[in-house]
Amino acid sequence: MLVLNPNERWTAPQLLEHTWITGANVNTAQLTGALIELRKFTARRKFKAA
């Protein structure tokens, strides 16, 4: 998406349709696992800080 040559750059409408923006093809299983690990980490951090 970041291209030095202005003629090769994506337009705003093209970028808005990109899967990074629309969220299409998101693997929810990976996101769920990451969220669980993040919650564990946060709980451990809070416990250590107490």
Image: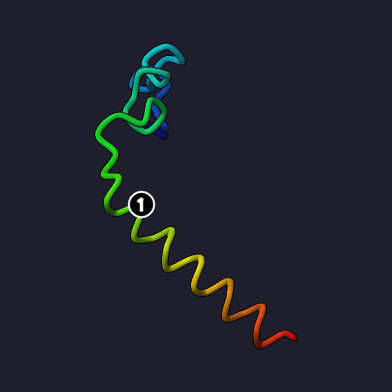
Measuring from the top left, give residue 20's x and y in whole percent: 37, 33
Measuring from the top left, give residue 32's x and y in whole percent: 36, 54
Q: Amino acid at mark 1?
A: Leu
Say which of 23 and 43 sits in front: 43
Q: In this rendering, would 48 be left or right of 37? A: right
Give the answer, above or below, for where 24 lies relative to 47: above
Model colouring: rainbow
The residue that appears at 42% across and 15% down in the rendered structure is 11
Q: Quadrant of the N terminus?
A: top left
Tell me the residue that label 1 is attached to: 31
Q: Quadrant of residue 47?
A: bottom right
Measuring from the top left, give residue 29's x and y in whole percent: 27, 51
Under circle 1, the secondary element is helix
Task: Name the residue furthest top.
Answer: 13
Q: How many marks?
A: 1
Q: Quadrant of residue 10?
A: top left
Task: Name the residue furthest right.
Answer: 50
Say which of 15 and 35 sits in front: 35
Q: In this rendering, would 15 be left or right of 30? A: right
Q: In this rendering, would 47 be left or right of 40? A: right
Q: Quadrant of the C terminus?
A: bottom right
- Crowd band around label 1 with a 10 angstrom C-alpha radius: few (<14), some (14–19), many (20+): few
Q: Quadrant of residue 37?
A: bottom left
The residue that appears at 35% across and 51% down in the rendered structure is 31
